[in-house]
Image (tube, rainbow, N blue to C red):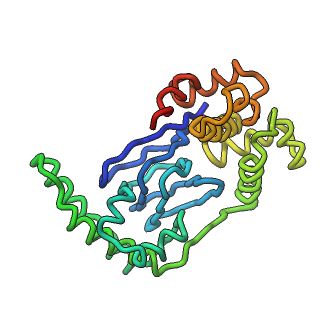
Amino acid sequence: MASNKQIGSADFFIAKKTSKGSSDILHQHQSFELYYLINGKREYFIGDRHFPISAGSIVIIPPKVLHTTTSAGGLRYLLHFSESFLRRYFTEEMLKPLLNQLPFVFCGDDIENDHIKRILAAMLTEYNNATNKQIPCNDVLMAGYLYQLLFVCGNENNTYVFSNNADKRITQIIQYINKNYSYINDIEEIARTFFISKSHLCRLFKKSLGITLVSYLNTIKIKAACAMIKEDTESLNQIALHCGFNSYSYFCKVFKFEKGVTPTEYKKRHKYL
């Protein structure tokens, strides 16, 4: 079963790494994520959409949006930057063209890619130099580089790509789950809705996203439960029922697996936040 991990990030972070293969971890960040694929091919699952990406693709994901990557590996740059970092250096007018169309997927031509890679290489050099010397990174310089990247993206079309009909069906299934999770008691209900067998549905979902359908359904239900717990207007038993769990004990089991704590412990942690 995939887990839904909350990955914390500082105001700014950049790394250059090789993704060796599929990840079954459906996760979200408190920060923005910018992913640039240098070579190879990947499959990105963001929110309720599925994106095949290739070398030269930029993906920008806003905070608190579930996502994961699957398929073969590839070399990539990965950036995280907080909203407070953005708003410290950019005006609302500068940010609006980009932030209004997130998540964002774009693949540039050779000239654009050369420009993007030069910016990212300069950012990484500055960041690593500061890290090695154990001194604060020059945020103003980083903000300038980041603005150049966002400017390139803000002037391009946001591309949503389906590679085949199976991808379209998976997106429809995901959208159905996101809308009806509180009423879905088992996978057979989803299979009947889309006129396919349970076994075929599970294979299609796993092949397309690298995670099981049960994992995704539980992740969506627990995400909704967390939001309701923070609102603190209903009991945990009521929240379990509203999120599609017929058994409170099963709700607690899934919650503990997804979040690492019981619903009661989670409620105590967030009561005074």
Can you tell which quarter of the image residue 226 is in? top right
Work out whether 139 lies above or below 211: below
> Where does residue 124 sit, x and y in percent of width and height?
24, 59
Which residue sits at x=37%, y=49%? 18
Residue 182: percent from the left, percent from the top? 77, 39
> In the rendered image of this protein, does residue 79 appear above or below residue 193?
below
Q: Which residue lies most toward the left here?
A: 133
The residue drawn where x is 80% and y is 41% is: 200
Taking depth in this image into account, of 189 and 12 the one nearest to the observer is: 12
Total marks placed: 0
Q: Residue at x 56, y 48 (%)?
A: 66
Find residue 9 and report its horizontal and vertical position in percent.
35, 46
Q: Percent from the top left, x then y, of residue 131?
A: 17, 49
Q: Is residue 116 left or right of residue 124?
A: right
Position of the N terminus by quadrant: top right
- At horizontal 37% and vertical 54% (from top left) the residue drawn is 80
**206 and 153: which one is in front?**
153
From the viewer's side, name the closer residue of 241 and 65: 241
Q: Nearer the viewer, residue 163 or 58?
A: 58
Residue 165 lies left or right of residue 116; in this view the side is right
